[in-house]
Every structure is written in structure tokens, then in C-alpha cells.
Amino acid sequence: MESSKEIEERALAWLGKRDSGRWSEADEAEFAEWLRADTAHRVAFLRREAAWEYSARLKAFGVGRKPGVVPPPGEWRISPFFDRRPASAVRAALKRSAPKIAAVAAAVLLAVGVGLYQKMKPTAEAYSTPVGGFASIPLRDGSTIMLNTDSMVRVALTEKERRIELEAGEVFFNVAKDPSRPFLVEAGGRRIVAVGTQFSVRRSGTDIEVVVTDGKVRVEPKFGHGRAELLTAGAVVHTTQNSLLVQKKTPHEADEELSWRTGYLTFDETALTDAVAEFNRYTRRPIIVDDPRLSALRITGTFSASRVGDFVELLKNGFGLQINESDKEIHLNSKGSGD
Amino acid sequence: MDEPLHSWFKREVMIHDEALTRYLRRHWPHPEDIHDLRQETYVRLFESARTHIPDAVRPFIFVIARSLMADRIRRQRIVAIDSTGDLEALNVVVDDRPSPERDTTAHQALRRLAEALDCLPAKCREVVWMRRIDDLSQKEVAARLGLSEKTVEGHVTKGMKRLTDAILGEIESSEKQTTGREGGQRDGKQQRD
């Protein structure tokens, strides 16, 4: 009998063959027959196929590179996820709260790229990203924080607690487990408490959105004795000053919500106006939807966050929208709307 | 006709692949069986999904895995002393979400993937980069690199294996096998020289 490993080898051979483009009707028939012969074949194939499809995320690393020119191993990973200017290879503009160490700011900026920042040990640190920026920052406790566009946090690690203040924007937290030191994120009058987990917090003014991709977190008011809400993986929470709305999604869907971490924005039947608002977070030249009727359009797909132009092009060709670009803004109109 | 089931499997089941492997490793004392057990679990899940797609996939996967392990122990009647305790523990399906080893995040997976890509043999890496990142067809890659299409397909298949191994957390075992074999060939050649 075929072993499970032999079956996987065969599954991989089919996958490679199908990828070759030399795939005849006879191949198709033979393949279908192979799948039919045994459910073990089918599941082995699907398992590898799913993983291979997932590997498409590597494309994030190819952004801004010339096709057909393969960079040497190791060198390409510093490739910025979010735009194509080589000068911005190190994108996180790190700001220090203490002005006296401003002199090392340049060194710190460099350090983000090479991972030396861990050696510096100030007690409170501030990190920020410009519009269109992105930064992944390891903290001394082993946690990692990923800053999305136009974001700022202050980090204070003490022996009793790990306290993060989210001043603006959106940050994903991958929290190292440490039961003796709770991990607190404060944003807009709320506090999110985690022990070892993964979640993101996005803030606009005092409204916050929390997406939990793993483990459990607690959302509670920063001051006073309001209700505390315990959230598990898949929870998406929107809060305003006085309200809190919990949506339950699968952990996978929650993960998709945070696709910005790979440099892409994922939309699934998203209203055009929402998709545009999302893109506008990454650009200084915002897209404006002039015709309110356009908000009925639904967008589905994955787009590079840095390539607003591609997105606009798609709207033009795919939906037949009229595009008017100026230096400051990009205007969207339905065709023949007259102006 | 199986298309919807296929995409269901890839979307809703595969996200638990890592947790299933971990569950099996924890409860089954013979690592060499894990591969089989996992495949059998998926076979049963898939067969059952043909009649009815389960609402809660993750617990269902664990239930199947548990019953497979219990079957094996009963069938083989070789109850290793250290696994009897596990069989009892098997009666309780505990999801390990709150444990420190967690499902890999998108970010970790991407890094693993990047590392696996860099660890490929030079030619294979070049082929996979052009095919997967630059989106060139196998034919175009062959033309650019002056290789036969058959050779390119070989490289792609090998790259697929290594990259999917990395995503599926199967780096260790397969890595050893392949490097072992390659190393052997090289040694043989050197002796000849």
C-alpha cells in the first residue's frame, strides 16, 4: 500500500506538473482519476495546494523589484513592504521622547533595519511611522509590535507591567507570555489587557477597534468601574466613548482583517467608499468619491497598499469609472456624470 | 463537482493543520506515525463533509484524531506503558489555544517562507523566485535561464515541496532526507576526481 508520504510526493508532482502550463486533456483526466481513486490522494493534494497558494504572499517581497532579476539570499528581506523608493528601505521614523538623545536618532533609524535597537534600553520609548509607512519592532520582553501607516505608540516596560499607549493609528501586538507582567494597551479611554496573545488595536480619536487573532484579551475602561469584556480569537470589537460592539469572526477572518501586516489590503464585498477610506490611510494624495451613487459598488480582492494607482486603474477599467487626477487628489466619478 | 468542498477544505480546515499536528504529537508516542494519522484524520473529515459540513471544524478534527488514536491502540494491542495515560487523556479533547505554543501567525509564516526560499539551492531558488514572485510562466523562466522546461518543472516541484514544508511546519524531517541524499552524491563524485 502507498504510504502517506508517497501520496504527498505524488501530490506535489501533480502540483508541479499543473503549474508547468503543459497540461493536456489526458493529464487532466489522469489527474481526476488519481483524485477519485482515494480520498487520501485528495486531501494530500489539497493540503499541499493550500500551502502553495499561501506562498503567494511572498509576492509582497517582490514589490518594487524588476521582474526576472533575482536578488541574492538574505539581501532582499529588507525590501520595504509599502512603497518603492529605495531611500525608504528603513521606513520607521523613530522618535525618542527624551530630546537629549536626539543625536542618536539617526543611528536608531538605521538600527531598525539591522536589529540593534534592542541593545538600547531607555525606559519609555516612542515609535512612529509616517503615512504609507510600516515597521515591525521587537521589544525587549520578546513581544513584537507592528505599526501600520501613520501610527504612534509609547512603550514603557517595567518589572510589574508592560504598558503601551497607542497615540494614533493601528498596531498589531504579538505578546510574549509573561504572567507576572500584564501587557496593557491604552487607547482612547480604554485599556486592553493581555497575557500572551496576538491582537491589533486601531484608534481614530477616541474610537477604537480591537481584532483578536489568538488567545484572550480583556477590554475595560481605563478609569472607573465600567464593564470589562473578555474577548477570544476571532473577536472584532468596535468601541466609541459609550458603546462597545463585539463581532464574532473565525480566527482566519480576523487574520484577514489584518492583511496590512503583509503589505496588502484585502477586501471582501467591501463598499467602494470603505475601500477608498482604507487606501487613503496609506497615501497623502487621497481618493475622493464624488458621486454618492458609487458607494453601492462592492470591491473584492487583494491589493498592494502602496499601489493606489493600480487600484484606481482597476476602477477605471473594471468598473468604467471616470478618473480625474490632480497633484493633491484623485477624484472618482461615474462615466458621463457631466462634469 | 467537488469544487466547493475543495475550497472549504483549503479555507476552513487547513487553518487548523498546525494545531492538529501538535495535538497528534502530544498524544501519540510514535512520531513516525504522525504523518499517517494526520492524513487519516483528513480522509475521515472529508468523507464526512461530503454528507454534512461540520459547523465547528476545529473540535471535530480533534474528535476524529482522538478516535483514530484510540482505534490504533485497541487494534494493535501494543499498549506502550507511556501511552496508556494518554489514552485516558484522549477522552477529553482540550484545545490548546491558550498554551504558549500558538498557531503560527501570518507574519511568522511569511518569515518562515522567506527563509525556506533563501535555503533553496541557487538554481532552484532563482526558478522559484521568477515563477512565484515575478509571476513568470515556467516556459518564460526556462527561456530566460536557458533551461529545458522539464528541468524548470523539476525545480518548481522541489521548491514547492520545500516552501510548503516550511508553511506546514515539516522542515526538519524532509530537510534531512534531501540533504543527506544530495551530500551522498557529491561525495561520490569527489572520490572519483
Image (cartoon, coloured by chain):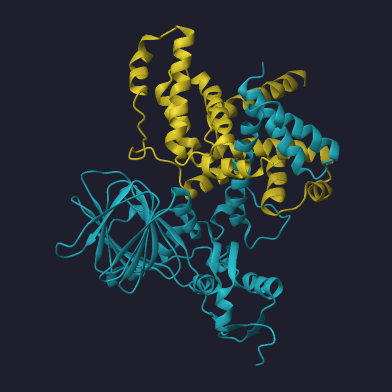
Chain colours: A cyan, B yellow
Along the viewing direction, whichever of B80 and A237 lies nearer the viewer = A237
How many numbered discs? 0
Q: Residue at x 52, y 19 (%)?
A: B32
Up-down relation of residue A33 to residue A49 (above or below): above
- Identify the image quadrant of the N terminus of chain A: top right
Counting from the top left corner in percent of width and height, residue A301 is at: 60, 61
Q: Is residue A242 visible?
A: yes
Q: Residue at x 69, y 70 (%)?
A: A318
**Is B7 positioned to the left or the right of B75 in the image?**
right
Which image quadrant for residue A154? bottom left
Which image quadrant for residue A68? bottom right
Seen from this angle, which residue lies furthest top? B77
Seen from this angle, which residue lies furthest left? A224
Counting from the top left corner in percent of width and height, residue A192 is at: 27, 58
**Is A275 positioned to the left or the right of A14 in the image?**
left
Counting from the top left corner in percent of width and height, residue B175 is at: 59, 29
Along the viewing direction, whichever of A149 and B70 lies nearer the viewer = B70
- Identify the image quadrant of the C terminus of chain A: bottom right
Seen from this angle, which residue lies furthest front? B51
Q: Is residue B121 visible?
A: no
Along the viewing direction, whichever of A312 and A112 lies nearer the viewer = A312
Counting from the top left corner in percent of width and height, residue B81 is at: 36, 9
Which image quadrant for residue A185? bottom left
Along the viewing direction, whichever of B47 and B22 lies nearer the viewer = B47
Q: Residue at x 56, y 22 (%)?
A: B36
